[in-house]
Image (cartoon, helix red, strand yellow):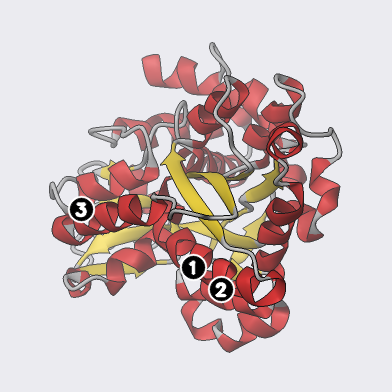
Amino acid sequence: MRRSFLALSFVLLAASASPAGADTTLLNVSYDPTREFYQEFNAAFAKHWKEQTGETVTVDQSHGGPGKQARSVIDGLDADVVTLALSFDVDQLFERGKLIPKTWQSRLPHNSAPYTSTMVFLVRKGNPKGIRDWSDLVKPGVSVVPANPKTSGAARWVYLAAWQYGLEKGGSEAAARDFIGRFYKNAPVLDTGARGATTTFVERGIGDALVGWENEALLVKSQPNGADFEVVVPPASILAEPTVSWVDTVNRRKGTGKVAQAYLEYLYTPEGQELAAKHHFRPTDPAVLARHAQQFPKLQLFTVDEKFGSWKDANAKHFADGGIFDQIYVK
């Protein structure tokens, strides 16, 4: 796993180098576990754009924790598009930077979420701790590996899924706090991002269950040592909706608005949706999703808006400095 990821990082660096005479170069600022997907998607879009317009387009990639990535764009990183793990971080481009309009989510289908995912468990071969549901993750003697909700988008999805489970099973916010406290007490390390958590679990051999993106768990299963692991899909989890936007102020200054918009719209085409499914993201196109139904088990899913009001509300209550996560984790 380590060699394959390291080798891939060198491929990505090579792919990001702009060829001489390129007509347009875009920068896609994204989050950790999309590296492999966008490497292949970028090549497909460049071929499509060349066939449609005769123009050459090169897409550079930047990856990291979504909050940090959003702050980098606000601070001046010239992102033509952002493809981040949660809408709250894209919202910051409007709230703090006025780089995009307030109504950015209405510009593309499905509230600008071209694919979805959910939070699942990756366990070791044979599932020696018998982990089947969220309740199994808080048992004494079980070691879990999530990322840090202060820095990772995946970790915030995980936290909210666990919180809601504790709330519904316990019937009160006090019960949810207790459940979350026991969950993080079982976490020996909190990596800053989802890919770091994968490395900790898969390569360093720490933990009984990696708790995070479904697409990341399925990626591990597709590796040469994938037989060493099993994916456990709980009966209920959260509908994770990564969102995308072109960055208007950068596009106007660089003259990249037309191609940046076309790049994101291509995510919704059958070709883009098939590539999303290939890289283990759940397509939003029903026909493409149906073709890959075996890969994506059905489970009960809830959204942030349904249970928490909005991402802004969830962030203020749970993840802002002094919020519930800080109160519980420090304790």
Residue name at image x 45 percent, y 42 percent: 62
Q: Can you identify the residue that label 1 sits on? A: 43
Q: Which mark is residue 258?
A: none
Give the structural element (helix, strand or loop) at label 3. Answer: helix
Identity, as a three-letter code, of the amino acid under mark 2: Lys
Q: Quadrant of the N terminus?
A: bottom left
Give the structural element (helix, strand or loop) at label 1. Answer: helix
Identity, as a three-letter code, of the amino acid under mark 1: Ala
Residue name at image x 45 percent, y 67 percent: 40
Give the structural element (helix, strand or loop) at label 2. Answer: helix
Which of pointers 3 and 2 lies earlier in the amino acid sequence?
3
Determine which quarter of the picture holds residue 57: bottom right
Mark 3 → mark 2, Cα distance in angstroms: 26 Å
Residue name at image x 36 percent, y 62 percent: 217
Asked whether the residues under the numbered discs 3 and 2 touch, taking CB atoms below 8 Å apart as contact, a structural biologist would say no
Q: Quadrant of the C terminus?
A: top left
Determine which quarter of the picture holds residue 110: bottom right
Residue 254 image offset from top left, x and y in percent: 68, 38
Residue name at image x 40 percent, y 32 percent: 148
Q: Can you identify the residue that label 2 sits on? A: 47
Q: Can you identify the residue that label 3 sits on? A: 6
The crowding category of the residue bearing disc 3, from other C-alpha atoms within 10 Å (few below 14, some 14 to 19, many at least 20), is few
Identity, as a three-letter code, of the amino acid under mark 3: Leu
Mark 1 → mark 2, Cα distance in angstroms: 6 Å
Asked whether the residues under the numbered discs 1 and 2 touch, taking CB atoms below 8 Å apart as contact, a structural biologist would say yes
